[in-house]
Amino acid sequence: MAESNDLRRPYLTLPGVTGMPSVSELIASMPDEQKHRFESSGEFIRRLAHRISKWREGLPADQEPAIVALLSNGDSVEVHTLGEDGHSSVVVEGRLNGMPCMFISHQSSFQVVCYTRKIEEKTERRKIGFYVGGEEIKA
């Protein structure tokens, strides 16, 4: 896949705009293994890590990206690491109300907010860890 600096680049281009087949036609023509990977939490995490890395490159030196996972009760978990848990679930390690926590969710109900925050003086930039297929991606 060609590298692009455009973090808003869609994962798939809009079907029909340039004569492309519909998404259902694309998926129907994919081998089962490729369909399985396309729908996986690992692919979601890998794409998120890529977007965060590209976003970080454009930020001022005194800012860094941060991610929070939103819980169904309205609480949020500050994400330190995000990994796949099987094919369709994600596991988050982070902080909830200042305390360390681990949060596991099916990817279909997993919601995150990405934002920037100012880096405190005398602290290093903090990288977010992404884990996919035994590989660690720091973004």
Image (cartoon, grey):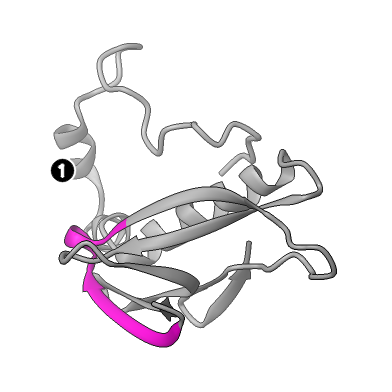
Report which residue position mark 1 lands on: 28
Q: Are there few (<14), some (14-19), or many (20+) residues within 10 Å of tag 1?
A: few
- Residue 109, position as x, y percentages in the image: 18, 60
Residue 54 is drawn in which quadrant?
Answer: top right
Residue 103 among those drawn in magenta = yes
Q: Quadrant of the N terminus?
A: top right
Q: Quadrant of the C terminus?
A: bottom right
Q: Can residue 86 be seen?
A: no
Relative to residue 135, is residue 100 drawn left or right? left
- Residue 120, position as x, y percentages in the image: 74, 62
Which residue corresponds to the image point at 41% horizontal and 61% vertical from the top-left? Answer: 68
**Residue that sits furthest to the top in the current view:** 18
Q: What segment carries the magenta color?
A: 99-111
Which residue corresponds to the image point at 25% horizontal and 48% vertical from the top-left? Answer: 30
Q: Main secondary structure of the magenta part?
A: strand
Front residue (pair 92, 108):
92
In the displayed structure, 15 sits above or below 134; it is above
What kind of residue is marked 1?
Ala
